[in-house]
Image (cartoon, grey):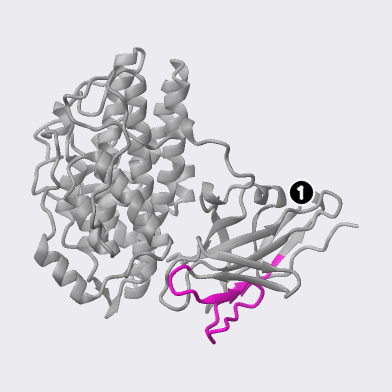
């Protein structure tokens, strides 16, 4: 007899078989209302389900520790069948939380959410109790992914085929030069904000990636003294180095329309130029993720400081961008080239400086226009790469594309959060920000399906044109770089 349908107030997450890849998962939910409300949870699997019973020991709780908002994704799990213990221990301050009811020996408590199975065997649906917020809203699952390879089940035998070590980006590098690991400097920062400033001031992209990975690793392991900085920390960081108008680079940038012609991808040379252009986008994307942390660290919305989750989200984006650059730089090396072999432009950073005074403008132009343009272009580039037999490059771009959808989602989450706090319509506010702070048309073709996954329905971007004037003239009509068509490269 089939299991009864889950009661009202639950949201479908996945099938039971989908929980077999890892022992813990990030779970992102979004309301179907406007402005959208986002909620982050963790799903833990303690044991594998038996084939005979089709049962699993699954638990769901808040993603952040209620003490100071630190992430619980890398928390230690304590399991003791004799003592009937099922608990996680926050890596930051060793607060323990029972996975079943959220209680702690410290007296704190976090929210847990009931998990039910609908169906039989590994095909059973996994449903999680929806968050309880005012208005009794309907929710949808927008992200379900393993926390990291650290929690893969079974653990991966090797990661050598997806190594993130990259060659130095010096123009003098020979394609035949050995690839050596980056050595981190001594006396690294002890706060997320100081890491942000350090990465922004680092010109060499390989080191930029290594520092980013180290910062996020320490953040998750509870080895940083702060994630959301105090006002004193912000003042000290800006006094010691300040916010950069232009991050240092080993290579001088040219205007977007002056970069090397990419062609249609029919030759390896054309694909090398394309991958080089993508790597350049990713190195600036690393800086943009850290810059939004550093530049807007003291921003207040209706008298309320940005929550810890804001900093966690953009640190995760920075980590993804570092992964993307590393994969592309490695691919260039495999193809007999290197990063720095072709001209690069700073169009993304110029747009960031045009939106340096407004968090809403920054999110709209950089993360909901530029990153969304990448979501549009990637499938077209993937098709070209596959047509010409470059499966390795296509595999890398598939990884990048999946991550970029989540980056647009992060932008939509925080744009919606700010609009909700100010009681303004996010769609109309987005269109206002683009008209005011962007120059040129938002042109198709649009990847409407993946944009919708990220929260960008067609009402956001159809028939939209920016009338802003760039202070840096990156897209200001003095060349063919006007509009969003030049913000993300593709094979054409």
x, y percentage for residue 262? 27, 21
In the displayed structure, does residue 345 sit left or right of residue 315? left
In the displayed structure, does residue 98 sit left or right of residue 302? right
x, y percentage for residue 102? 60, 77
Along the line of sight, the residue nearer the viewer: 295 or 214:
214
Which residue does the image show at 20% across and 62% down from the upper left? 295
- Outermost residue toward the bottom in this view: 107
Q: Residues within 10 Å of mark 1 (few under 14, many from 20)?
A: many
x, y percentage for residue 234? 19, 70
Which residue does the image show at 33% across and 55% down from the upper left? 215
Can the viewer see residue 464?
A: no
Along the line of sight, the residue nearer the viewer: 12 or 61:
61
Above or below, 248 relative to 409: above
Along the line of sight, the residue nearer the viewer: 167 or 426:
167
Above or below, 484 relative to 31: above
Above or below, 73 relative to 229: above
State which quarter of the image contains the N terminus: bottom right
The residue carrying mark 1 is 122
């Amino acid at each position: 007899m089939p299991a009864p349908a889950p009661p009202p107030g639950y949201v479908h997450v996945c099938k039971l078989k989908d929980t077999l890849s890892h022992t813990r998962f990030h779970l992102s939910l979004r309301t179907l209302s406007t402005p959208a409300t986002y909620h982050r949870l963790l799903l833990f699997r303690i044991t594998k389900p038996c084939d005979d019973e089709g049962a699993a020991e699954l638990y769901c709780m808040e993603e952040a520790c209620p003490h100071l908002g630190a992430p619980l994704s890398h928390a230690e799990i304590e399991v003791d069948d004799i003592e009937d213990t099922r608990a996680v221990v926050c890596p930051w301050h060793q607060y323990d939380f029972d996975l079943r009811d959220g209680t702690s020996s410290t007296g704190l408590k976090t929210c847990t959410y009931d998990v039910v199975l609908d169906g039989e065997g590994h095909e059973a649906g996994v449903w999680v109790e929806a968050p309880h917020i005012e208005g009794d809203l309907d929710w949808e699952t927008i992200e379900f992914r393993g926390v990291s390879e650290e929690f893969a089940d079974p653990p991966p035998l090797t990661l050598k085929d997806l190594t993130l070590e990259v060659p130095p980006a010096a123009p003098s590098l020979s394609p035949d030069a050995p690839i050596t690991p980056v050595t981190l400097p001594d006396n690294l920062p002890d706060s997320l904000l100081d890491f942000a400033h350090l990465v922004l001031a680092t010109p060499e992209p390989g080191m930029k990636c290594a520092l980013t990975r180290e910062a996020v690793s320490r953040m998750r392991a509870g080895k940083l003294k702060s994630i959301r900085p105090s006002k004193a920390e912000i003042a000290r960081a800006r006094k010691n180095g300040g916010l950069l108008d232009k991050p240092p680079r080993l290579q001088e940038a040219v205007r977007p329309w002056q970069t090397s012609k990419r062609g249609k991808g029919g030759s390896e040379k054309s694909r090398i130029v394309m991958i080089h252009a993508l790597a350049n986008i990713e190195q600036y994307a690393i800086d943009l993720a850290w810059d939004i942390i550093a530049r807007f660290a003291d921003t207040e919305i209706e008298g309320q400081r940005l929550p810890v989750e804001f900093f966690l989200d953009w640190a995760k984006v920075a980590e993804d961008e570092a992964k993307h650059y590393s994969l592309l730089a490695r691919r260039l090396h495999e193809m007999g080239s290197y990063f720095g072999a072709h001209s690069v432009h700073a169009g993304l950073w110029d747009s960031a400086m045009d939106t340096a005074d407004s968090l809403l403008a920054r999110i709209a132009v950089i993360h909901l226009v530029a990153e969304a343009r990448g979501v549009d272009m990637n499938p077209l580039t993937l098709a070209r790469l596959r047509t010409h037999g470059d499966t390795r490059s296509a595999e890398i771009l598939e990884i990048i594309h999946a991550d970029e959808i989540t980056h647009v989602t992060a932008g939509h989450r925080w744009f919606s959060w700010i609009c909700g706090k100010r009681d303004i319509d996010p769609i109309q506010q987005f269109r206002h920000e683009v008209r005011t702070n962007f120059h040129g048309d938002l042109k198709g073709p649009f990847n409407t399906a993946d944009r919708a996954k990220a929260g960008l329905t067609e009402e956001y971007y159809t028939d939209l044109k920016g009338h802003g004037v760039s202070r840096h003239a990156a897209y200001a009509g003095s060349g063919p770089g006007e509009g969003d068509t030049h913000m993300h490269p593709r094979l054409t």
